[in-house]
Amino acid sequence: MLRKLAIIQVVCLLCIFQMLVACGGGGGSDDGDQDPGDSSGVSQKDWTYLVYMGADNNLSTAGVIDLNEMEMVGSDENINIVLQAEFSTEFTPFSDFGYTDYSGQTLRFLVQADNNSDRINLKSGDEIGNVNMGHPNTLRDFIQWGTANYPAKHYALVIWDHGAGWKSRSYVKGAVEDATSDSFMSLPDLAKAVRDAGVHLDVINFDACLMAMYEVAYEFKGLVDYMVFSEETEPGSGDPYDTILAALAQNPGMTPSKLAETIVEKYVDFYRESQREDKVTKSAINMAYIEALDQAVVDLSNAITSNFATNAGGIFSALNKSQRYAYPTNYDLFDWCSALRNQFPSGPIRIAAQALIDLLNDSDFVIKNQTFGESVANSHGLAIYAPQVNQISSDEVVNELSDYSRLACNQARSAVWLDAVEALMQGQSSNVVPAGFAF
């Protein structure tokens, strides 16, 4: 069976490839332009669940399994399950699934129930050539096409693929790899695609690694109501689409906040029940609080930089006691602020840290946060970038500080978190060798 339990065997194979050499940044000659479609005469349902699956890489077989999970539920009179996917013939033996004519085409599906856990139905997808899934125009066009042809009262978008939080370029990435097109979408590209699509989304769910960050959330300010993501790397199995979509099908009238909470619950439940992973995180936030979060982060930045030389020892001591992740420069914001509060019994840093703790404790902001595993037990739903050196690649292509400065959260304001990052780095640099993806 292709059910989740079968992925135990698949993951063993995928692990061989989990640290592939990275490919080029988002872009490419194929901009993926597609006709957004015509919604005339199409009835409106409660939800359209859009899944953008960039599986033309070493996650291909995991994508096939997730498609099978979607088929176990399928679209009905209340919900549309709409998928755009591209798989890899290098990593998935499609002949094993009864297909000898799949050669890497990009497919669009209205996913239908087939109640067959042993195979997928690739022939139900419409071929649109082999487009560049790593280009923002391709994601933009999929959103426009999906919402025009399958209108609904609410829209959820899943970004499915490798992920690396805010990072981009050669040795670390944003999200969505297309190996054939040799491209990968950066965080600003992802947000640009959603913005250019012109469709306000109810929920964005990152089925990808390391995306639950202040920087990621801020990039999508004004574009979505609720965001779901993981602070830590995601297991190769990713989201359990069968249980998430079954819950939505059973209660199609659920609110966007309830769907966001459901994704978190079903995700962590799956790994807790299977006992196959020991560091699982997933959280959901209300994007209406992003301005308040940003102001609190900027206030902490000002407090850190105002008298940094005097307070540096305590700041770094607090960092070293805080929850961190596969990228060791990603720290849980709540946990670090708790350590700062303990380190500084009074003064501006304590006040700013307490303000962030209060905000992150607000269940109207972080509406759901769940973890499984002792190594991530101090995760509270949102990480932040807090490096102690500037990572520069040996090929001189990557300069983290330069890349970080380009994010929306560091633009067009008198004070930004970048100010604190520069203080933390203290002018230090460290050469790194280009490596692979978080997985």
Image (cartoon, helix red, strand yellow):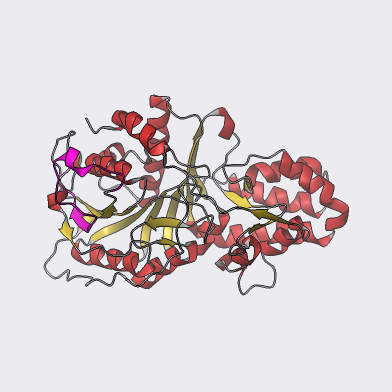
Image coordinates of residue 86 in percent, x first then y, are 27, 55
Looking at the rendered structure, the number of numbered marks drawn on it comes to 0
Viewer-side residue, 420 vs 6: 6
Residue 109 within the segment the image draws in magenta = yes
Magenta stretch: give its range: 90-112
Image coordinates of residue 286 in percent, x first then y, are 48, 53
Image coordinates of residue 231 in percent, x first then y, are 53, 45
Whether residue 217 sits left or right of residue 147 in the image: it is: right
Viewer-side residue, 58 vs 349: 58
Q: Residue furthest right?
A: 310
| Image quarter (top left, top right, bottom left or bottom right) of the N terminus | top left
Image coordinates of residue 47 in percent, x first then y, are 26, 53
Q: Residue furthest front?
A: 395
Residue 150, placed above or below residue 117: below
Whether residue 28 sits left or right of residue 396 in the image: it is: left
| Residue 28 occupies quadrant | bottom left
Residue 407, placed above or below residue 18: below
Q: Residue furthest bottom?
A: 412
Q: Residue at x 43, y 24 (%)?
A: 275
Dominant SS in magenta: loop
Q: Residue at x 42, y 37 (%)?
A: 15
| Residue 194 occupies quadrant | bottom left
Residue 332 within the segment the image draws in magenta = no
Viewer-side residue, 171 vs 273: 171
Residue 29, placed above or below residue 259: below
Q: Residue at x 49, y 36 (%)?
A: 370
Whether residue 297 sits left or right of residue 284 in the image: it is: right
Residue 269, placed above or below residue 113: above
Whether residue 143 sits left or right of residue 121 in the image: it is: right
